[in-house]
Image (tube, rainbow, N blue to C red):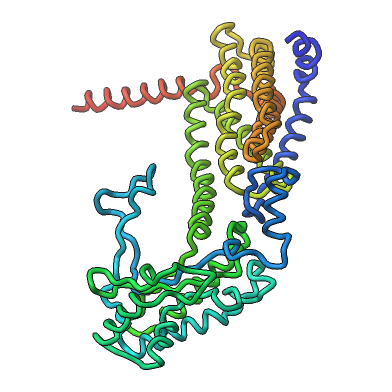
Amino acid sequence: SKILRKYILPTLSKKPVAVIGVLILVAWGVTNFFFAAQLSSPKETLKMFGDDHMVTLATNLASDGYAAGAGSDYATMKLSFGLSGINRDVEPYVDSWKPHEFYGVPVYDSSFDLTTADAQTFLRNICDELAEKKCTEEACQPYGTLVMPGDGTMSCFINDFYTWTGGVVYEGDEFLQKLEEFRAETTPSATEVGESTWKKSIGFVGGKLHFVIIEAQLTLKAGEADSIKEPVKDLLDAWVDAKVAAAPGGMKSIIHTVPDEWSFLITTKSVLTGMFTGFAICFPVVFVVLLCATGNIRVSFMAVIAIIFVVGNVLGYCWMAGWSLGITESIAAIIVIGLAVDYVIHLGHMYLEAGVRENISERDLRWKYSMRMMGGTVVAGAITTLGAGLVMQFCQIQFFKQMSTLIIMTIVYSIIYAMIAFMGTLLLIGPEGDQGDIGKFMMALYRRIRGQAKVRTVQC
């Protein structure tokens, strides 16, 4: 506190210094906004441990240290026919906190029909085309195909069924009877993908064929980053849409899914969407909170601008550090707002309290009063929060270490922008007297409304 009053405050109280400080921080903030705009989805998955940790080294060796990975290293796609979707609006209903207890019930396509020769030919062509489907995306290299080449990487029951029947084509009820026999008597020929029985691939429910599933091992590695696997999903989306358009009448319900991979991709996108939704909610809420705390619209507006710059600077640092806009950064972006409010709200409130307690109206005297009464407190608060964040720098788990860095950068930028940019702006153009006082505005509005009411009463 003595160092602050003796050395720092006399320097910051000079208006030329305030002008230079505000301009520098605004320019630096704008630069970081530009950097933040360059953030994109992660190029690699979030690592649990650092690059030099033995678990990371062992995992990398197991997945990249051999000419080819094991089958479990690659994602498996399921292509279903006859399923329209999942109904989750039925009892006992899906619990968002315990989604594993009830997933919903399948919705079957009542028009699904595999008993015709055209439908069976269409399904066989799907299997043949899928096995040869080219893929130029990064995730498909070095193979260049969507499905892993080789035997046993695709479980296509219709091909095994025709081999079992000796190439004889059955239709109608006879086809269903033969398919049930095939389902009970044989097992899949694919060794790298799918189940050990046809029970989940040939969906007889209540004696009726409701759905069938084809499974294929993709050249997409499991656990790849969103930016790598999303183009593969887009490729599959377009391909399936084309197949639906060309399908016979009873084969229009085609859905592709890659368990874990697609769901995690959607989850990550939802987190990013939540970040922008959080911005849309948090900033107006912060403005209202500041307005209630200070009672001054000008001080509240300046404080919100300072907080926006803090958020932009932290996200800009993420880009400079080589990070991407992943789950950690999205969560941190919302946390930053809460951490950044603390210092400006205390300094701004004390700036206005100078007029209430000491009857000070001049902005430079209010500035000195606020910095003298609250400057040391907010700096001490920043130091203690920095200490709390620094402790996590020694964590082995990367999430906590990364969150520690983000907290530290938030506190550093928050105290700098509060003490220099925010207070510098108040020193230069801060409200004097009752300027910006929301109470005065509300009172004037009340008097005007009351006066109009009296006029109407007299007229009556």
Residue pushed farthest left?
460
Specify whether residue 178 is in view. yes
Name the spot of residue 233 as percent of width and height, x first: 53, 67
In the displayed structure, 108 sits above or below 362; it is: below
Q: In this figure, what is the number of numbered marks? A: 0
Who's the residue at 52% across and 36% down the image?
Answer: 283
Q: In which image quadrant can residue 44 be found?
A: bottom right
Camera-nearest residue between 358 and 386: 386
Residue 54 percent across, percent down from the top left: 72, 44
Locate residue 58 relative to residue 111 in the image: left or right: right
| Furthest-top residue in this view | 358
- Residue visible at 40% across and 92% down? 166
In the image, 432 versus 203, the foreground residue is: 203
Q: Position of residue 139 (x, y in %)?
A: 64, 66
Indicate whether 428 appears above or below 308: above
Q: Residue at x 62, y 64 (%)?
A: 70
Of 168 and 381, nearer the camera is: 168
Up-down: is 246 above or below 405? Answer: below
Is residue 421 something one can see in this rendering? no
Quadrant housing the N terminus: top right
Q: Is residue 259 above or below residue 389?
A: below
| Position in image of residue 424 (x %, y %) | 70, 25
Say whether residue 181 is left or right of residue 80. left
In the foreground, 319 or 370: 319
Please state, as top left, top right, bottom left or bottom right, where the C terminus lies in the image. Answer: top left
